[in-house]
Image (tube, rainbow, N blue to C red):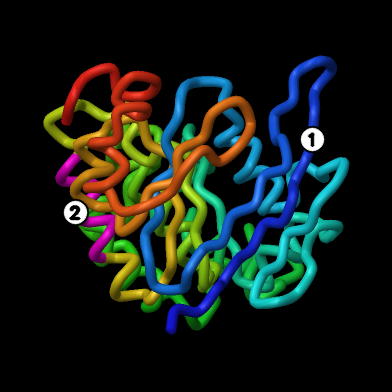
């Protein structure tokens, strides 16, 4: 029997006259990679923001491992085991790749002055291993500003993994990356998540990525979940082809 890691119940939120979440209910099962697809403005990112505490719904509940986290601040939700990677990598570009991970683990360990203390923490080897997991060990000592968008995406994921999450929510992990690099990045990412035993949810517009790397797909439209199922079922559904994909996969 599958284990529910996160459950959203009847979420609702609006921005002016726009209903971004309209009675959304969804469960995330431990150990699976779920893709969220749908047209722009469907409410996909809003859902991630609610689950991570960046937005508070007008109505509804978010449960993580059975605990109500709806009203908690983002940092408290992170400490419970929910991490987030944004569409645009949130990195300290003037610092090296390794320093970004050291800052993250400093936050995890609640060091008083992470920028001052990061090079003395005992988890330095652990952070080097994380960089190796995402294929970026060779750029550990290079400033992030010098790195490609694909490398920044992977380092951003490593920063999230440094928090030791149980669930990682990702907003378009391959956006802004050259087409020739997308599958390589996802191969590295999925392998790293499996090694770290982290469940993932990712918003994605590339149906090739969804088909290859998702265990399950949820389709968003007009602020709600229209359907969910395996990639094979969802990506061949006539409504999804018409409204989301635009052509057969």
Residue 248 can be seen in this image:
yes
Residue at position x 73%, y 42% in the image: 23
The residue under the point 57% across, 21% down is 41
Q: Residues within 10 Å of mark 1 (few under 14, many from 20)?
A: many
Q: Is residue 5 left or right of residue 248?
A: right
Q: State the image coordinates of residue 219 (x, y, percent, origin top left).
A: 45, 38
Q: Which residue is mark 2?
A: 187
Position of 55 with respect to 171 (left or right) is right
Q: Could you tell which of marks 2 and 1 lies nearer the N-terminus?
A: 1
Dot in front, 2 or 1: 1
Q: Nearer the viewer, residue 126 or 81?
A: 81
- The residue indicated by pointer 1 is 13
**Main SS class of the magenta portion in the image:** helix
Q: Residues within 10 Å of mark 2 (few under 14, many from 20)?
A: some
Is residue 184 one of those drawn in magenta? yes
Could you tell me residue 106's position as x and y percent? 61, 68
Q: Position of residue 147 (x, y in %)?
A: 30, 36
Using the numbered discs, state the Cα–Cα distance from disc 2 to disc 1 in whole angstroms. 35 Å
Q: In the displayed structure, would residue 46 be above or below residue 157?
A: above
For the point 16% across and 31% down, the residue is: 249
Q: Position of residue 148 (x, y in %)?
A: 28, 33
For residue 32, which quarter of the picture?
Answer: bottom left
Which residues, given as a range, are shown in magenta? 183-191
């Amino acid at each position: 029997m599958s284990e529910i890691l996160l459950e959203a119940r009847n979420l609702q939120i609006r921005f002016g006259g726009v209903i971004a979440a309209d009675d959304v209910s969804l469960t995330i099962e431990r150990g699976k990679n779920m893709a969220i697809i749908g047209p722009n403005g469907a409410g996909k990112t809003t859902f991630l923001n609610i689950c991570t505490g960046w937005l508070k719904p007008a109505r509804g509940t978010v449960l993580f491992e059975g605990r109500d986290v709806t009203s908690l601040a983002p940092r408290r939700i992170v400490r419970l085991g929910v991490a987030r990677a944004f569409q645009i990598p949130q990195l300290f570009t003037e610092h090296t790749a390794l320093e970004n991970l050291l800052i993250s683990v400093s936050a995890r360990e609640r060091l008083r002055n992470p920028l001052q203390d990061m090079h003395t923490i005992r988890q330095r080897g652990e952070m080097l291993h994380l960089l190796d997991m995402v294929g970026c060990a060779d750029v550990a000592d290079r400033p992030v500003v010098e790195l490609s968008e694909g490398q920044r995406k992977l380092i951003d994921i490593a920063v999230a993994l440094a928090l030791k999450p149980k669930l990682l929510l990702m907003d378009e992990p391959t956006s802004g990356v050259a087409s020739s690099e997308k599958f390589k990045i996802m191969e590295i990412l999925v392998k790293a998540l499996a090694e770290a035993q982290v469940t993932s949810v990712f918003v994605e517009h590339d149906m090739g990525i969804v088909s290859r790397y998702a265990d399950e797909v949820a389709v968003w439209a007009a602020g709600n979940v229209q359907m969910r199922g395996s990639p094979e079922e969802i990506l061949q559904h006539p409504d999804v082809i018409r409204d989301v994909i635009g052509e057969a996969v």
